[in-house]
Image (cartoon, rainbow, N blue to C red):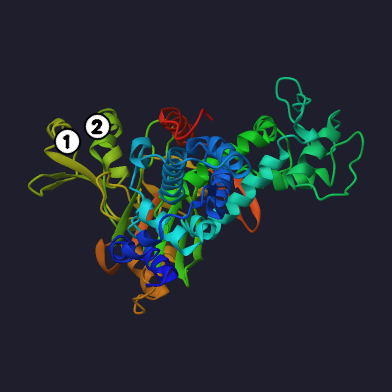
Amino acid sequence: MNMKNCLSSLLGRAALVLWLFCGTAMAAQGLPWFDGDRPGAQAHEAVAVLAAAASHGLAPQDYSAAALGRSIAGAARGSPLDAAAMALLEQALNTAMERYLADVHSGRVDPQKIHHNFSPPQREPFDAGAYLQAALAAGRLGDAALEAAPRLPIYGSLREALAAYRARIDHAAWRQPLPPLPGGKSPKLAPGQAYAALAPLAERLADLGDLPPGLAQPAARYDEPLVGAVKAFQLRHGLAADGVIGKTTLAQLQVTPAARARQIELALERLRWTPLMQGPRMIVVNIPEFVLRAYEVQDGRIQVQEEMKIVVGKALDTRTPLFDEDMRFIEFSPYWNVPPSIARAEIVPRLRRDPGYLARQEMEFVSNGGRVDRTVSAGLLDAVLAGKARIRQRPGPKNALGDIKFVFPNRDNIYLHHTPATELFQRDRRDFSHGCIRVEHPVELAKFVLKNMPDWTDERIRTAMSRGQSATLRLPEPVPVLIAYGTTLVKDGRTFFFDDLYGLDRLLDAALRQHSQTLPTLYGDAP
């Protein structure tokens, strides 16, 4: 069988089965690491791939890249290798490349160990050993190594951003921190004010690409074009783009390119195990960005159809969990069944102090037998605490869920919904909920979800939302929903950074460092 055909098959969905069929032909040719008693072209190609692992945000030392590179270079120009040395080097090359291919394809850590309730996506079976042998037999190791990485445009864009931020590390603009701002106890720099460090500020913003090259900056006062550059910087860092440099903006300006490079490396790692293309249509929530995107996959590319602001769980105590599930229902004019934790901690104590709160908030008690009561009593409050009754809020303008609820059944009882508190969408930081996710434009989201149900027109959706009578619609085609966590994105060629809201970047960073520390050295002395 033709080796290239074998490789093509192995890269497809039936990789493992087809490898068993193709394996005999490839075994007969051997693994071409060597040309006689010298390292062959593919051995040199392998060490080049391993040495470039950092371009994917991986650690070359995890694959003994330097030691293997030295050995291959020495064997190429020194005395011929004996059989034992060749066998040892061949085994090390095989193991290093298999480890690399597995890492670049699926990531290095188990996401569930760092509070991500999903597993690496099973896009297709992936056997790193079979994949490697097929690539070697076909003579296309370098191309196959690239193809093992996630085939997402954002992955390539982040690799470019990583290279750009690494190139900035030694730039003169970052050798000294920016000095304190004027203003005493409430320091800030507003347009028109004097600031002694305008020149280094301009140099830093120019290096980041926020200040176009060649634009002059007045020597003494903070004015245009520097104000516009600061606004561009603020926009890329999830800040209010007002051009005023306060404590938060200055702190972001002080973050070094090395720290940003590490942030991008963490984003690349997440992409390797985040299930972003599970179906032709999908909804993705990015918690640190406070943004929801609804997109379609067309010809293997993501086409965003809707994008909107969201409110997520409070970072302090009610964080929104990360997981992926299928949206199966829409509830119009929903009831809000108060979660037991909120009932115990907030509603019941409030009702003991102020029984009239129940009527003002259009709430009611529902016993386990289905009886509805709208009068507060000590017995009913005790029943709620004992789990024998619940509190719910009726549909209407005061309902905490607004007028629509998007349901994707999950163990955490998290869902998407509208809200009467629409003013929260104007905040820059939007972690205010008890865990569920509030969406800015519910009608547009409903139209996206119901796209394949043309009888659900804009008017019909709005009517169902405003009717005040709860109704549930089952979706004939479930829509995957992914609640993800990315503190770095590339949009329209610009790199955006967001705060590590829940501290999950710190957890991932620690897990990756621990992973590298526990790996056995594959060949030679570390690194």
Q: Earlier in the sequence, mark 2 or mark 1?
A: 2
Q: Which is nearer the eye, 252 or 152?
A: 152
Q: Which residue is mark 1?
A: 384
Q: For residue 213, which numbered disc appears in the image?
A: none
From the top left corner, tell me how far across and down residue 382 is, in percent. Answer: 14, 31
- Within 10 Å of disc 1 (Cα), the crowding (few <14, some 14-19, many 20+) is many
Label 1 SS? helix
The image shows residue 344, relative to residue 125, as above or below, that is above
Q: Looking at this view, name the residue that lies furthest to the left.
A: 369
Q: Looking at this view, name the residue that lies furthest to the top.
A: 185
From the top left corner, tell me how far across and down residue 170 is, in percent. Answer: 74, 34
Amino acid identity at mark 2? Arg
Q: How many marks do you count on the picture?
A: 2
Amino acid identity at mark 1? Val
Label 2 SS? helix
**Which residue is at 50% across, 51% downward?**
34
**Which residue is at 84% across, 49% downward?**
213
**Disc 2 to disc 1, C-alpha distance:** 8 Å
Q: Is residue 287 visible?
A: no
Q: Quadrant of residue 252?
A: top right
Q: Quadrant of residue 242?
A: top right
Q: Which residue is mark 2?
A: 344
